[in-house]
Image (cartoon, helix red, strand yellow):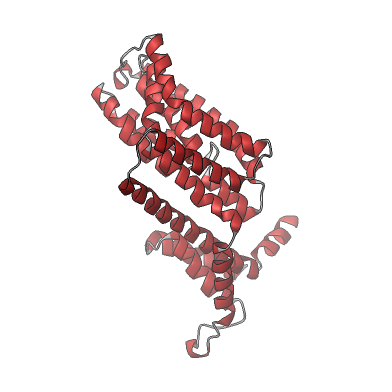
Amino acid sequence: METALYGFAVLLILIVVVRVPIAFSMGIVGFLGFAYVQGLSFSNISDFNWTPSLSMAAKRIVDTAQDYSLSVIPLFILMGNFVTKSGLSQELYRASYAFLGHRKGGLAMATVVACGGFSAICGSSLATSATMAKVAMPPMRKYGYADSLATASIAAGGTLGILIPPSVILVIYGLLTETSIRELFAAGFIPGMLGIVFYLFAVRYVVWRKPENGPCGEKFTWKERLEALNGVWGVLILFAVVMGGIYLGVFTPTEAAGVGAGGAFAIALYRKSLTFGSLYDILTDTARTTAMLFSVVIGALIFSNFINRAGLPADMLTFVSG
């Protein structure tokens, strides 16, 4: 147990003090720690046997790269990038704004609702926050919203990306813990909806205390509101097909990710928002994000091998049981 605790301490030092990326920190500590618990010593590096750690790390890298179930990660990321490029984020915000913008704090509430809708087809909190910041921040500044309320609504709404399915983080968690992804998606949906509701109450509370922080926006007629809804049908259909297919057993989560990516590509083509340049940017951004996530997964697996080999789970179980 002591060896594992020392490993955690070194991991925190690498991340917090030395500022080594988390993926590499876990990989380094896991690799060296695994070698140490094999009965080796760091006192004489020349006699150090690297074979066990090298074999373990190589197996983890190869197995992760060849894992078919992990293909769901780049496909969901690709779906979100296609949706972003097709301009559906603007349509989501416009529809939310049409119904809520005329109220006190309405633009901030519309931002939260739009973040929830975008999360349902993106799966990433970072992408949700970055996209909605570009869409929602200019109107809120135009109407004189306090920067604290504007940025808080975007940041809070962005957190919905890891709750509302299809969430990339839930997919990774399910794969690492061998938990049903379909059940994780079901478990994340209700908290995500509750998050939207309570964030809306929080905005109302802020503008109730300080009305000047969230002035009313433009009021739309019912005809304009219904017209604004026309732009979000693509999002609703895509979400219904992907999630409905998973829960009805029509296809697996991996197949659903492929269907979603294909559907988002079709929507982008229909809206004539794709060029060869933008397609290249989408694919390269997907590859970069996927590589980052795969690095985290591989580093976590190597580190977990070290923790298991050090006997921490067994020692903790013995400690808890008495």
Which sits in the foreground, 17 or 164? Answer: 164
Which residue is painted at 45% across and 26% down in the image? 232
Which sits in the foreground, 299 or 39? Answer: 299
Dividing the image into 4 quarters, which one contains the C terminus? bottom right
* Left or right position of 303 against 141: right
Report which quarter residue 190 is drawn in.
top right
Residue 179 coordinates in the image, percent (x, y)? 66, 49
Which residue is painted at 73% across and 61% down in the image? 318
Q: Is residue 204 visible?
A: no
Residue 271 coordinates in the image, percent (x, y)? 38, 33
Query: In this rendering, is residue 37 above or below 183?
Result: below
Dividing the image into 4 quarters, which one contains the N terminus? bottom right
Query: In this rendering, is residue 8 above or below 290?
Result: below
Which sits in the foreground, 313 or 89? Answer: 89
Residue 47 coordinates in the image, percent (x, y)? 52, 90
Total numbered circles: 0
Which sits in the foreground, 85 or 150? Answer: 85
Report which quarter residue 158 is drawn in.
top left
Q: Can residue 114 be seen in this view?
A: yes
* Left or right position of 164 against 146: right
Report which quarter residue 250 is drawn in.
top right
Which residue is painted at 36% across and 33% down in the image? 87
* Left or right position of 27 against 21: right
Residue 186 coordinates in the image, percent (x, y)? 63, 36
Query: In this rendering, is residue 200 above or below 312?
Result: above
Q: Which residue lies furthest to the right in this view?
A: 322
